Image (cartoon, rainbow, N blue to C red):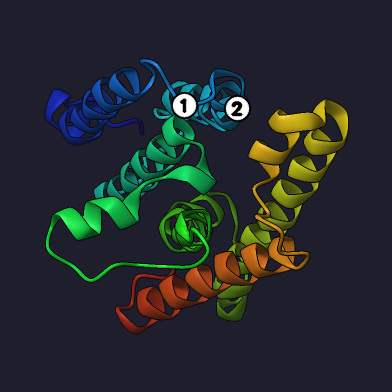
C-alpha cells in the first residue's frame, strides 16, 4: 500500500522545499560555473529519481533528513569549488584558531556521503530484499563501497576528458596522489559507523 495521507509527505516535502531554496541561492554566481555544473550532475539525477520513486519506496524521515544534510553540504562545495570552500575563514570569524594546511572540505563530504546516504541504502535493500541478517549489513556496505569507487572513477574520467582548470577543479586532489584512496576510505568509514549505529539501535531489517 502506498502512503496516501498528506501528513505522510509533509516532512520530506518540507525538506525538498528547503533544499530547493538553498540550492537556488548557491546556484547564483558560483566560483567556477563549469565545475558547478559537473558537481551538480549527481543532483540532477538523484533528486528527481528520489521524487519520482517516492510512492514506490518512501524512506524514513531519518533517511530523508540525512540525505538533506548531505545534499546541503554538497551544494556548498559545488558553489565554492570543493578545494576552495572558505571554512577556515568562517572558523576564524567565529573566533576559532587559524586553520592551516590542505583544504579538507572534500574529505569531510566524502565521509558524510558514507555516513548520511547509508540509511537510505539500508532501507532500499530492506524493502526489496529478503536474506539472512548478516547481509543486511553487508549488502548496504558493499553498495556504498561500489558507489565510492565508481565516483572516483568518474572524477578521473572527467579530469582526463576536460583537462585544464576544469579537470583539476573537479578532481580536487590538491597534489595528493592518494586522494582517491583516502576519499573512498573516508566514505566507507562513514558507512561503517552509520551501519554499526543502526545495528546497535536495532534499526537494521529483522529478516
- Name the element at disc 1: loop
Tell me, yes or no, whether the two marked residues, 1 and 2, touch with CB atoms within 8 Å.
Answer: yes
Query: What residue sits 63% from the left and 73% below the top?
Result: 138
Q: Which residue matches tag 1? A: 31
List x then y, in percent, for residue 116: 41, 57
Front residue of this view, candidates 160 and 143: 160
Numbered circles on residues, count: 2
Q: Is residue 195 left or right of residue 72?
A: right
Q: Which disc number belongs to residue 63?
A: none
Image vertical order of residue 203 relative to residue 19, above or below = below
List x then y, in percent, for residue 168: 71, 40
Determine the residue located farthest toward the bottom in the rendered image: 200
Query: Quick one: label 1, few (<14), some, or many (20+) residues within 10 Å?
Result: some
Quarter occupied by residue 154: top right
Q: Which disc number belongs to residue 35?
A: 2
One can see residue 63 in this view: no
Quarter occupied by residue 64: top left
Q: Is residue 174 left or right of residue 47?
A: right
List x then y, in percent, for residue 49: 52, 26
- Name the element at disc 2: helix
Amino acid at each position: 500500500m502506498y502512503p496516501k495521507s498528506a501528513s505522510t509527505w509533509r516532512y520530506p516535502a518540507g525538506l525538498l522545499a528547503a533544499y530547493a531554496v538553498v540550492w537556488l541561492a548557491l546556484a547564483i554566481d558560483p566560483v567556477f560555473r563549469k565545475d558547478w555544473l559537473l558537481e551538480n550532475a549527481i543532483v540532477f539525477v538523484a533528486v528527481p529519481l528520489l521524487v519520482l520513486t517516492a510512492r514506490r519506496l518512501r524512506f524514513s524521515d531519518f533517511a530523508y533528513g540525512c540525505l538533506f544534510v548531505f545534499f546541503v553540504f554538497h551544494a556548498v562545495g559545488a558553489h565554492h569549488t570543493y578545494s576552495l570552500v572558505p571554512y577556515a575563514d568562517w572558523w576564524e570569524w567565529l573566533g576559532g584558531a587559524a586553520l592551516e594546511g590542505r583544504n579538507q572540505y572534500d574529505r569531510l563530504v566524502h565521509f558524510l556521503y558514507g555516513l548520511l546516504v547509508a540509511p537510505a541504502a539500508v532501507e532500499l535493500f530492506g524493502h526489496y530484499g529478503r536474506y539472512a541478517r548478516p547481509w543486511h549489513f553487508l549488502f548496504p556496505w558493499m553498495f556504498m563501497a561500489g558507489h565510492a569507487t565508481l565516483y572516483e572513477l568518474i572524477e578521473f574520467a572527467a579530469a582526463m576528458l576536460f583537462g585544464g582548470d576544469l579537470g583539476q577543479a573537479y578532481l580536487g586532489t590538491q597534489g595528493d596522489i592518494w586522494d582517491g584512496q583516502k576519499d573512498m576510505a573516508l566514505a566507507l568509514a562513514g558507512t561503517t559507523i552509520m551501519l554499526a549505529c543502526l545495528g546497535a539501535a536495532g534499526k537494521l531489517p529483522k529478516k
